[in-house]
Image (cartoon, grey):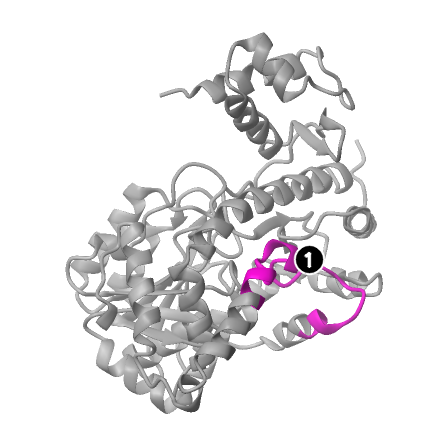
Amino acid sequence: MTYLYSELANNFVERIEKGIYLPGDRIPGVRQTSMREGVSPATVVSAYRHLELEGYIEPRPRSGFYVRTRFRPELPEPRPTKLPVKPKPVSGQELVVQLIQTINIPGIVLLGANIPDESFMPTREVSRALMAVSKNYRRELARYEVPPGLLELRLEIAKKMASIGTITSPDNVVITSGCQEALYLSLKATTHPGDVIAIESPTYYGLLQIIDSLGLKALEIPSDIHQGISIEALQLALDQWPVKACVVIPNFSNPLGTRMPDERKQALVDLANKYRQLVLIEDDIYGDIFFEGRRPDTLKSRETQNNIIYCASFSKNLAPDLRIGWICSDRFQPRIEYEKFVSNCATSTFNQLVVARLLSRGVHERHLRSMRIAVAQSAKKLSECVTHYFPAETRLTRPSGGLALWLELPKSVDATQLSHAALEHNISIAPGSMFSNTTKYKHCIRLNCAVAWSSRVEAAIEILGELVSAAAPAKHA
């Protein structure tokens, strides 16, 4: 099915590609196009938003829409990586602490930590909710909301889960202090020290830290930028090793940005059903940040044998500092609640009340609609800048959601050394070695694409490109 706005947008794309509209040209206004094309102004606005999202045009205040400069050709995508499938203890995560500490350094261009700029967050609405809760819920602030957590919030989360096709009872929701704690509690409740845990490779560095702290062994399974975790390699590993749990980010994984196709999600769930001892732990923290189409399905929505634990939070799309996450589980619920209480007794009642208020009043869902567009635009600009300033040997992902861009640099580039050199220019990046317990990604980096775009950010990308070029001598013919 083709929508009218899409046809109109495609007509403009054709004109731009043929040079009828050149970079810097102003395209006709909404009213003019509406009259000329015989469509409603709303259709024109939708078409222009689509063109803006795709990077063809850009708005200028009080002036209209202009054709953007589009850098060509596009960089190729990263290549698959072969991995030795063998479990091993996690080590060498000291670099993570150094990266996180850069967040608080004044003047840093934060391209390393996967944290959206404050301009992407509904800070005004959150501030209002904070004041309302402070005024109206004084008695509630004088008690602990012990696990599973505030009922009002659990009800709102159950409604949210139902809206994305994942039916769960509020009684099966446990409130956590962010998704990091959700993953920690899920593994703590289902494993013992020495157990083998299958993970995507590359994977979120915080998961590696959790595995290390619990004394577990990580079994890295190769992941494809289009298909997600290799189910074939995972099955071979399950036949060879006593894998207790598999942790995956099926929707816009960190750091690759992969959206696992529906048929691969089903195959993964089927595999877990076949190996009864295997628990799937689903990290869906980025599922709400999709750029086009509908919200992707969850693994949890396909569950038939109570062997999937679902983890998520509002840290990436509402307010990081509120530290509100949650776990949806059936079979492991009692143990998760126990581990939560032992860990820190309870998550802040005040913060739970704030998030419940924002959810019940529709603030969160309204915000997501604008945030998706803003992040998609930022990712597009960042990709174009990388294409323009980095060496032609660079490879770059093209995610359809999430917050991360993954770059494969020329193999002569040591990304850790690059990160140190970048810090001297007040630029923070995340080197690939942080995302694996192997040495496979030493020439890769992850960039945060949820940045407030400015000439300073573009200058930072230009400097990074120069540093990469200096570390990767040009090939001679």
Q: Amino acid at mark 1?
A: Leu
Percent x, y of residue 398:
55, 40
Q: Quadrant of the N terminus?
A: top left
Q: Which quadrant would residue 153 be assigned to in this image?
A: bottom left
Q: What kind of element bears circle 1?
A: loop
- Per the image, is 356 magenta? no
In front of the other: 317 or 328 = 317
Q: Residue at coordinates 50% horizontally, 14% vertically from top-left?
A: 39
Q: Is residue 134 above or below residue 16?
A: below
Residue 196 visible, this orientation = yes
Q: Residue at coordinates 51% horizontally, 79% vertically from top-left?
A: 134
Percent x, y of residue 139:
41, 87
Percent x, y of residue 458:
78, 46
Q: Residue at coordinates 47% horizontally, 58% vertically from top-left?
A: 201
Residue 89 visible, this orientation = no
The span shown in magenta is 101-127
Q: Is residue 315 above or below residue 7?
A: below
Q: Residue at coordinates 40% horizontally, 20% vertically from top-left?
A: 2
Q: Which quadrant would residue 32 be assigned to in this image?
A: top right
